[in-house]
Image: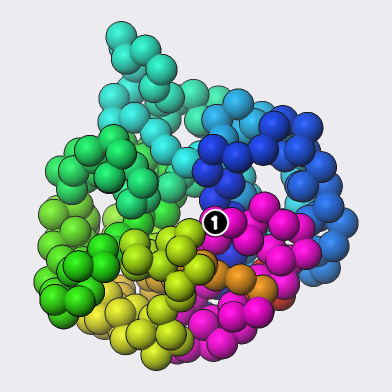
């Protein structure tokens, strides 16, 4: 069975003390996480060490960075490298979130470079893709998302692509309170899997975890995650509430 993943994206929220308390609360409420499941916390850079130490050796729970630069080192003031993440024991990073694409002009090619440097250094990318409302209304979401995947990932080998986690995020549903229906989510996830199947074959495509992101909450997670091609969620606002995020973890298959 594919890994079923509940990934929290804290974005630019919480003080260090608030983040520490939130992790304490979530860990206290979280019961056993099954072998095929993972809980991932993408916390702001200043909190990575605190969060990593907080987890200790807890099984099936991981800390992720929200971004990484496409160079190993150098005169890139304000950026963070894969070596820096590795020195903290961080092995997962979120790449290509729609906010990075929109506000920081990250292109598909730039993200391909970030994917490369992560895989070269044994860091798992959670690669985000998804369409804006105008693209959805024009019924062009398949073409748009297919292009994002092809331009950033299709240079990879089959063995490399199996190390990627995909997060499909309809931009029109991020932080808006709107959520794709479970049918819409399944339709896009099945399409994404078909894109990988066409390139790499069904066996490879069926190993890739595809997460849904876009106003996932405790009260809709179970229905979303029940869809055959939805392997969990990348969660924003609801991940800042301990009880909400624990409910989302508990909704995993």
Residue 97 picture location, percent across and down: 36, 50
Q: Indicate yes or no whether the magenta region holds residue 231.
A: yes
Q: Where, by quadrant of the figure, is residue 202 drawn?
A: bottom left
Q: In the rendered view of the protein, which quadrant contains the C terminus?
A: bottom right
Q: Residues within 10 Å of mark 1 (few under 14, many from 20)?
A: many
Q: Position of residue 63 (x, y in %)?
A: 61, 45
Q: Is residue 133 left or right of residue 252?
A: left
Q: Is 203 displayed left or right of 3 in the figure?
A: left
Q: Which residue is mark 1?
A: 236
Q: Nearer the viewer, residue 46 or 166?
A: 46
Residue 240, placed above or below residue 229: above
Magenta residues span 219-248
Colour option used: rainbow
Q: Position of residue 164 (x, y in %)?
A: 37, 58
Q: Residue furthest right?
A: 28
Note whether residue 52 is visible.
no
Q: Please tell me which residue is depicted at 58% across the width and 46% down the height of the picture.
A: 10
Residue 25, relative to residue 198: is it above or below?
above
Residue visible at 45% across and 86% down? 182
Residue drawn where x is 48% and y is 59% of the image: 175
49 vs 155, nearest the viewer = 49
Residue 204 seen in this snapshot: yes
Reply yes or no: does residue 80 show up in magenta.
no
Residue 222 position in % (x across, y down): 61, 83
- Total numbered badges shown on the rendered structure: 1
């Amino acid at each position: 069975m594919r890994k079923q993943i509940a990934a929290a994206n804290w974005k630019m929220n919480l003080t260090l003390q608030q983040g520490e308390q939130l992790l304490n609360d979530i860990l206290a409420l979280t019961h056993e996480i099954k072998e095929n499941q993972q809980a991932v916390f993408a916390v702001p850079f200043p909190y990575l060490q605190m969060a990593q130490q907080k987890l200790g050796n807890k099984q099936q729970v991981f800390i992720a960075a929200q971004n990484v630069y496409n160079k190993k080192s150098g005169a890139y003031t304000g950026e963070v490298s894969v070596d820096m993440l590795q020195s903290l024991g961080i092995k997962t990073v979120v790449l290509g979130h729609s906010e990075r694409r929109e506000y920081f002009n990250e292109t598909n090619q730039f993200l391909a470079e970030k994917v490369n440097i992560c895989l070269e250094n044994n860091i798992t990318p959670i690669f985000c893709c998804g369409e804006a409302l105008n693209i959805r209304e024009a019924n062009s979401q398949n073409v748009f998302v297919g292009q994002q995947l092809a331009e950033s990932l299709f240079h990879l080998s089959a063995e490399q692509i199996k190390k990627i986690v995909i997060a499909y995020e309809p931009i029109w549903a991020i932080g808006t309170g709107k959520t794709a229906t479970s049918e819409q989510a399944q339709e896009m996830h099945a399409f994404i899997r078909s894109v990988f199947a066409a390139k790499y074959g069904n066996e490879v495509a069926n190993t890739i975890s595809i997460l849904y992101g876009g106003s996932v909450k405790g009260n809709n997670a179970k229905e979303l995650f029940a869809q055959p091609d939805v392997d969990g969620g990348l969660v924003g606002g609801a991940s800042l509430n301990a009880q909400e995020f624990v409910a989302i973890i508990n909704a995993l298959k």
